[in-house]
Amino acid sequence: MAGYKRNTYLINPEFQIKFSLYVCGLVFVSSIIYPLTIYDLITSFITFMASKNPQVASQLEGKRSSLILILSLWQIGFTVLVFIICIFFSHKIAGPMYKLQKFLRAKKDGLESGKLFFRKGDYFQEVADDFNDVFEELEEQHNQDLVYLNEVNSYISNLGMVVPEDKKAVLNEITQKLNQIQNRFDNEQ
């Protein structure tokens, strides 16, 4: 199971796309500064050159437009690349959460009795380990409680032999309730 390779990268599309758009928005806004700075520097240089050599200034204006176009395309390409990387990165977060949710549903329905494992390379491996430790402890306590319920039921049955008749009704009621609890415990296993 540990070597399982997932082909679907949008496991939780709402989370993954929102996460990717937030990161891309931050990257885009923070990196838009350099093209604007370059544009401002070139504009200042063109203004300076216009007073010295108008012919060079007009050539620089054409190059400025080309440079800004190239920088804009690079900016868009970089943002798309960051978006794709965020999708790949976020699926290593969304995958374990999806697997945990699926495991819990199966556990609730009584269909899962094994351990929770995440794929190699997924984040939150320690969550699966902690989760398995907690469920092992709960199962151990569950088994101890079941053994104790069996003992209590035996004690009450033995007690029923020496208790006066007017108290046997109460003991029978307690025994029935204990049997119901035991049956519920047995059905959960």
Image (cartoon, helix red, strand yellow):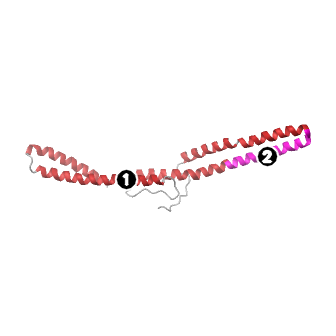
172 in relation to 115, above or below: above
Percent across and percent down for residue 107 are 38, 52
As drawn, is 111 to the left or to the right of 71? left
Provide the secondary structure element on which disc 2 rests: helix
In the depicted view, which residue is nearer to us: 104 or 131? 131
21 in relation to 126, above or below: above
Residue position marked by numbered label 1 in the rendering = 135
* Label 2 crowd bin: few (<14), some (14–19), many (20+), radius 10 Å: some
* Label 1 crowd bin: few (<14), some (14–19), many (20+), radius 10 Å: some
Q: Magenta segment: does it hold 75?
A: yes
Residue position marked by numbered label 2 in the rendering = 67
Residue depicted at x 52% and y 50%: 94
Residue depicted at x 88% and y 40%: 49
In the depicted view, which residue is nearer to us: 169 or 38? 38
**N-terminal label among 2 and 1:** 2
Question: In this view of the protein, can residue 141 be seen by the observer?
Answer: yes
Percent across and percent down for residue 19 are 57, 45
In the depicted view, which residue is nearer to us: 164 or 37? 37
Residue depicted at x 66% and y 47%: 79
120 in relation to 71, above or below: below
As drawn, is 78 to the left or to the right of 187? right
Q: Magenta segment: does it hold 170?
A: no
Provide the secondary structure element on which disc 1 rests: helix
Residue depicted at x 48% and y 54%: 125
Question: In this view of the protein, can residue 186 be seen by the observer?
Answer: no
Give the number of callouts: 2
Q: Magenta segment, which residues?
A: 52-78
